[in-house]
Amino acid sequence: MNIIKLHDLYFKPYINKAKLDIIVNHLAKQVKADLPKDEVPIFVGILNGCFLFAADFIRAYKGNCEISFVKLASYEGTSSSEKIKNLVGINEDLTGRTVIILEDIIDTGATLQEIYNIFKYKNVKQLKVATLFFKPDVFKKELPIDYIGHSIEDKFIVGYGLDYDGLGRNYPEIYQLTQQPKMKNIVLFGPPGAGKGTQAEFLKDMYNLVHISTGDVFRFNIKNETELGLLAKKYMDEGDLVPDKVTINMLKAEVEKNADANGFIFDGFPRTESQAEALDAFLADKGEQINAMVALEVPENTLVTRLLERGKTSGRTDDTDETKIRNRFNEYNTKTAILKEYFESQDKYYGINGVGSIEDITKRISEVFDKL
Ligand code: AMP
């Protein structure tokens, strides 16, 4: 999950689909447990916000039931207004029925008040209210709410049926209002030997960014014989990837060390899909995001020559043995190359011709950076 932009505002991931499923299933179970065995309730969903919640709720409800919808809007923009519009929709005779209102969110309680007023005259057997979300800090009424899925703080949310000025309803998860992202975060991408490290050294100064090379951090740890270094060494020596969990935790620690940064150049990370997902989630949690993946595209044979050449002076053991170099390419092609699609699908992939002089390539990359 990533930061999303709807109209002029930014929203960060807040509640994922798995958690929503748990909340909705639990609500459906509770409602069922409180009803007499043969009771056929009629669920009344309050549109528009409840449509996804209601759809999931009735599928989780194990028993016969009916469903109907009414429309009654109370939101304008991001602040709840006290003005309530008219009710449209109920045609059924509700006399003697058990009616259970399905609300996506209850905040001030103004809509809820209106619902109680309307259903007072319908001669129902009983009226109950189930809400997916509840904002306890702003609820001003003395009205019963029978079932609450999840209490949340008083911040505007969208997704899973809820909108901001018409947009956002189609996202399967819940997002929360956040500030505009402040950082510029770039993934510098490419196979081993593509020149990521060399380019990052120039770009970090040009754009005042912090350069994190996971390979460098591992090598630093190996040199200093830390626990992490000892662990990483056996993978690196073979040209294998270090396990994701180790690498992800290390990367997070490096980012946390530079909390005031304008942004980061990630070099050599992410290298697997699960690293990419972890990075997205980690940044989104801070209200930040990856702006672009800038990929240096260089043919493999050129790279092997480059690496063997570099191995003569770099002191890197993984640069001297062609078999190990080939294994690094194999790791790249099987686990890392797919990240092109991952970032392409987010419209964030920028391929750069990585063959040429260092200055020319820096220029090509900076043209992309300047556009972001
Ligand atoms: P590099 O300096 O980027 O070429 O990385 C050298 C070696 O460090 C790789 O061959 C891996 O063994 C390890 N490594 C660096 N970054 C990662 C990563 N993101 N995930 C797993 N292993 C990594």
Image: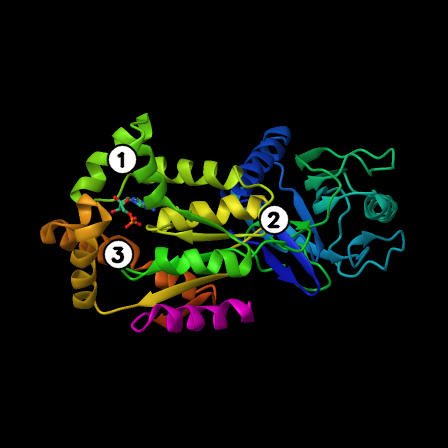
**Three-letter residue code for mark 3:** Pro
The residue sitting at 36% across, 55% down in the picture is 197
Q: Earlier in the sequence, mark 1 or mark 3?
A: 3
Magenta-span inclusion, residue 36: no
The crowding category of the residue bearing disc 3, from other C-alpha atoms within 10 Å (few below 14, some 14 to 19, many at least 20), is many
x and y percent of residue 120 in the render?
A: 86, 43
Per the image, the residue denoted by label 1 is 232
* Circles 2 and 1: CB atoms closer than 8 Å: no
- Left or right of 96, for residue 233: left
- Left or right of 240, for residue 103: right
The crowding category of the residue bearing disc 1, from other C-alpha atoms within 10 Å (few below 14, some 14 to 19, many at least 20), is many
Q: Nearer the viewer, residue 62 or 270?
A: 270
- Residue 17 shows in this picture: no
Callout 2: SS = loop
Residues in magenta, as a range: 354-372
Disc ID at residue 192: 3
Judge: label 1 CB < 8 Å from ligand 1: yes
- Left or right of 112, for residue 303: left
Q: Residue 183, located in which quarter of the rendered image? A: bottom right
The residue sitting at 53% across, 47% down in the picture is 283
Residue projecting furthest to the front: 313
Q: Quadrant of the C terminus?
A: bottom right
The residue sitting at 55% across, 42% down in the picture is 20
Callout 3: SS = loop
